[in-house]
Image (cartoon, rainbow, N blue to C red):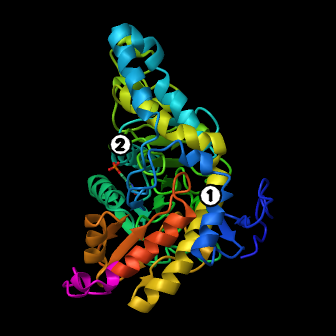
C-alpha cells in the first residue's frame, strides 16, 4: 500500500529521530508502518527510551511491575487524575446541590465536542449520552424512520453482538430484513464501489463497525459511506474499537451517524457513558424514538407536547450521568494533549512488533494471526488463534504475567495501547504467551471449542 491518492501522504511531522516508525496514511483511516520493528529486546527498550509518548504513559496508573496489560481495548487503564476529577464532581454536588445544574447542563455537549476532536467531528455534533447499545438503538431507529420505504438493513454477520441484536430487534419491530455484507471473519469487509454488492436502492441503513471487535479488521469508512450514499442509504458506524485508537475523519469521510463507548481506548472506566455523533445537516431531519425531556425544546417550560430541540441535544433522552461525564473528561485528556495521529503512529508500530513476534515465537507453536495480514487494514489489536487459546489466557492471568482476553471459538485478543503500553511490554508478553502455550497444563487442557 503506497497511499495512492491518500490525504496527508508521506512521513508525518515530528518523526525525525533514529528508529522512529514511518507511517503512511491511505484513504479510509489506514496506515502502514514501513520501518522494521525492533529485532531484539534491547532494541525494544531503546525504542521506549526514545518514545515521544513516554510522558503519556506516566499519566496512567501503570508502574511496570504488574502483569503486561493487553486488554485496554476491553477496559482502558485508569488515568491518574480520574479519582480527583470524579471527586471534584462529587464535591460540586455536595456544595452546590441543585445549583450545580447551571454548569452540568452543558457538560454532555462540551465533553462530546472534545471526544469529537479525536474523531474528526466539528463541534456541535457529538454528545455524551446513555450506553453504546442504547445510542445504537436511538440512531438506527431514527435512520429507519427517515427511510420508510426501504426494507433492508445492511450489517456484518461478524459484528459485535450488541450491534447484531439491536438491528435484529429493530428489523423485527419495523418489518424489515437484515442483509449481511460478505465479510471475512479475519479480514473484514472491503467495500467495492465497482460492484453493487449488498447495496441497492432497497437499503435504508448500513450499520457497521469501524474496527472489528474480534479480528481488529479496519473498515474503510470513506469507501463504505460513499457506497451507501450512492445507494441512497444512511450510515451508522459503531466506533467502540476505533475511538481513541485509529484516526477517524467523521466529517471528512461523509459519516451520517456514529456511536461508541468511552471505557475502551478512551479510558473512562467501567460503564462510563457513551457518545453519539449526528452529522449537523441531518440533526433537524431525524427523530429519535425516545421522546424524553432532555431532547425537548425549551426543556424547563415543560410544555404539553414533545417538540425536539434543534441540534445534537435532541438525541439525548433523560438526565445525563454527570459523574460519569467527569470520568470521560479524565479519560480523554491525555489523548487530546498528544493528538490521535501521534497515538496512531505508536499503535501501528506496536502492532507491527506484535505481529513480528507472534510470527517468530507463536506460529511455530501452532498459533496463527486471525487479523488482516495487510498492516494497512489492521486496527489496534491482533487476534491470535490457537486451539488452546483459552487455557493459555487463563494461565497467564492466574500467574499475573499477561492480561489478555479470549473470544470464542479460539482467539486471544492482544491490544498494545499507545497511551501506556511499551515496546518491551509487547516483547515480554509474547515470550510469556509462548511459555504458556508450551506449559504442560495448557497442552493437556481440552480445547474449549473445536478449531475452525
Ligand atoms: C464494547 C462495544 C460495545 C459496548 O456496548 P455497551 O452498550 O457499552 O455494552 C458496543 N459495540 C461495540 C462494537 C463494542 O466493541
**What's the residue at 47%, 29% (across, down)?**
108
* Ligand 1 has an atom within 8 Å of the beta carbon of the residue at disc 2: yes
Residue 193 seen by the camera: yes
Q: Which residues are magenta?
A: 436-452
* x and y percentages locating residue 163 in the rendered image: 36, 58
Whether 326 is drawn above or below 255: the answer is: above
Q: Of circles 2 and 1, which is in front?
A: 1
* x and y percentages locating residue 251 in the rendered image: 65, 47
Residue 190 seen by the camera: no
Q: Which residue occupies the foreground of this view, 268 or 67? A: 67
What is the quadrant of the N terminus in the image?
bottom right
- Does residue 8 belong to the magenta stretch? no
Whether 246 is drawn above or below 134: the answer is: below
**What's the residue at 51%, 47% (across, down)?**
257
Whether 446 is drawn above or below 245: the answer is: below
Read off the residue under disc 2: 131
Read off the residue under disc 1: 344
Q: What number is the disc on residue 73? A: none
Amino acid at each position: 500500500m503506497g497511499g495512492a491518492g491518500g490525504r496527508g501522504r508521506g512521513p508525518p511531522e515530528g518523526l525525525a529521530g533514529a528508529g522512529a516508525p514511518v507511517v503512511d496514511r491511505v484513504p479510509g483511516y489506514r496506515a502502514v508502518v514501513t520501518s522494521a520493528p525492533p529485532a531484539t529486546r534491547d532494541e525494544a527498550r531503546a525504542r521506549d527510551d526514545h518514545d515521544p509518548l513516554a510522558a503519556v504513559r506516566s499519566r496512567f496508573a501503570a508502574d511496570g511491575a504488574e502483569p503486561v496489560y493487553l486488554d485496554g481495548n476491553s477496559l482502558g487503564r485508569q488515568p491518574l487524575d480520574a479519582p480527583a476529577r470524579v471527586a471534584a464532581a462529587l464535591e460540586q454536588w455536595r456544595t452546590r446541590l441543585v445549583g450545580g445544574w447551571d454548569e452540568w447542563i452543558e457538560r454532555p455537549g462540551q465533553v462530546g465536542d472534545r471526544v469529537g476532536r479525536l474523531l474528526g467531528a466539528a463541534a456541535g455534533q457529538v454528545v455524551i449520552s446513555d450506553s453504546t447499545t442504547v445510542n445504537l438503538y436511538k440512531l438506527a431507529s431514527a435512520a429507519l424512520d427517515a427511510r420508510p420505504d426501504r426494507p433492508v438493513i445492511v450489517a456484518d454477520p461478524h459484528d459485535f453482538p450488541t450491534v447484531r441484536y439491536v438491528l435484529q430487534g429493530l428489523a423485527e419491530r419495523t418489518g424489515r430484513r437484515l442483509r449481511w455484507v460478505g465479510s471475512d471473519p479475519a479480514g473484514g469487509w472491503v467495500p467495492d464501489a465497482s460492484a453493487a454488492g449488498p447495496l441497492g436502492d432497497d437499503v435504508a441503513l448500513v450499520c457497521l463497525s469501524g474496527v472489528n471487535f474480534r479480528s481488529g479488521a479496519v473498515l474503510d469508512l470513506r469507501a463504505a459511506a460513499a457506497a451507501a450514499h450512492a445507494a441512497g442509504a444512511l450510515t451508522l458506524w459503531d466506533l467502540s474499537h476505533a475511538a481513541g485508537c485509529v484516526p477517524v475523519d467523521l466529517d471528512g469521510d461523509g459519516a451520517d451517524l456514529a456511536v461508541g463507548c468511552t471505557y475502551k481506548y478512551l479510558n473512562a472506566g467501567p460503564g462510563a457513558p457513551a457518545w453519539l455523533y449526528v452529522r449537523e445537516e441531518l440533526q433537524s431531519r431525524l427523530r429519535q424514538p425516545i421522546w424524553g425531556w432532555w431532547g425537548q425544546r425549551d426543556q424547563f417550560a415543560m410544555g404539553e407536547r414533545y417538540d425536539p430541540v434543534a441540534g445534537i441535544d435532541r438525541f439525548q433522552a433523560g438526565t445525563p450521568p454527570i459523574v460519569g461525564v467527569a470520568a470521560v473528561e479524565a479519560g480523554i485528556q491525555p489523548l487530546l494533549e498528544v493528538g490521535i495521529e501521534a497515538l496512531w503512529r505508536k499503535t501501528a508500530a506496536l502492532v507491527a512488533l506484535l505481529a513480528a513476534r507472534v510470527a517468530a515465537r507463536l506460529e511455530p507453536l501452532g498459533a496463527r494471526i486471525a487479523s488482516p495480514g495487510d498492516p494497512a487494514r489492521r486496527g489496534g489489536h491482533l487476534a491470535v488463534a490457537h486451539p488452546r487459546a483459552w487455557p493459555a489466557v487463563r494461565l497467564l492471568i492466574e500467574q499475573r504475567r499477561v492480561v489478555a482476553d479470549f473470544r470464542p471459538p479460539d482467539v486471544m485478543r492482544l491490544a498494545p495501547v499507545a497511551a501506556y503500553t511499551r515496546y518491551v511490554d509487547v516483547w515480554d508478553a509474547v515470550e510469556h504467551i509462548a511459555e504458556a502455550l508450551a506449559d504442560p497444563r495448557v497442552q493437556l487442557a481440552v480445547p474449549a471449542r473445536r478449531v475452525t
